[in-house]
Image (tube, rainbow, N blue to C red):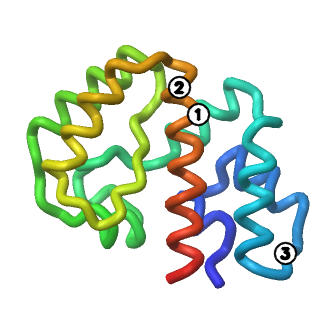
Amino acid sequence: MLTIEEALEGSTPLARKVAAGGPFASSFELVERMRATIPTLTEEEKIATLNAHPRIGEDPRRLSAHSLKEQGADPLPELELLNAEYERRFGFRFVVFVNHRPKSAIVEVLKQRLERSREEEMSEGLNAIVEIAEDRLRA
């Protein structure tokens, strides 16, 4: 089984708080603890957790092995512009569970999510982090 840090892209506030509640008997129990821990995070901790995740379309040399496998290495310039716009608008990184979708499909998701509120996006991004971790733990 992956470590909590591998599943969550590093020693984020979420990873540290979840780890403090371990050990866990199963990956299901670990994921449930992640979900239960998110509401206990401060806004600063939520932002730090989101910002620890790599940008969609990031330079492949700066991606973790897990993120590179999930995202692929093909660049898409539109993603760079949309990521910058998203970060200016919301103050944290766009996080989405790619789930083997092409980057062109993610561009459309990002455009739609730019229309939402900051609160909706923070919640959506944190839920995506748990979905990504759950998928990694299953693999």
Rendering coords of residue 130 (x, y %) = 60, 55
Q: CA distance from mark 1 to mark 2?
A: 5 Å
Rendering coords of residue 45 (x, y %) = 69, 33
Q: Give the amino acid at mark 2.
A: Glu
Which of the two discs, 2 and 3, labels the residue nearer the N terminus?
A: 3
Q: CA distance from mark 2 to mark 3?
A: 30 Å
Q: Give the amino acid at mark 3.
A: Phe
> In the rendered view, would you say 32 is above or below 53?
below
> Element type at marker 3?
loop
Q: Give the amino acid at mark 1.
A: Ser
Name the residue rendered at 62%, 78% in the picture.
2
Name the residue rendered at 51%, 39% in the picture.
125
The reply to whether dot 1 and dot 2 touch (C-beta < 8 Å) is yes
Name the residue rendered at 50%, 61% in the picture.
132
| Residue at the disc numbered 2 | 120
Image quadrant containing the N terminus: bottom right
Which of the two discs, 3 and 1, labels the residue nearer the N terminus?
A: 3
> Element type at marker 1?
helix
Left or right of 50 on screen, residue 4: right
Query: Is the residue marked by circle 2 packed among few (<14), some (14-19), or many (20+) residues within 10 Å?
Result: few
| Residue at the disc numbered 1 | 123
Name the residue rendered at 22%, 29% in the picture.
82
| Residue at the disc numbered 3 | 24
Rendering coords of residue 131 (x, y %) = 54, 58
Q: Which is more foreground, mark 3 or mark 1? A: 1
Q: CA distance from mark 3 to mark 1?
A: 24 Å
Query: Is the residue marked by circle 3 packed among few (<14), some (14-19), or many (20+) residues within 10 Å?
Result: few
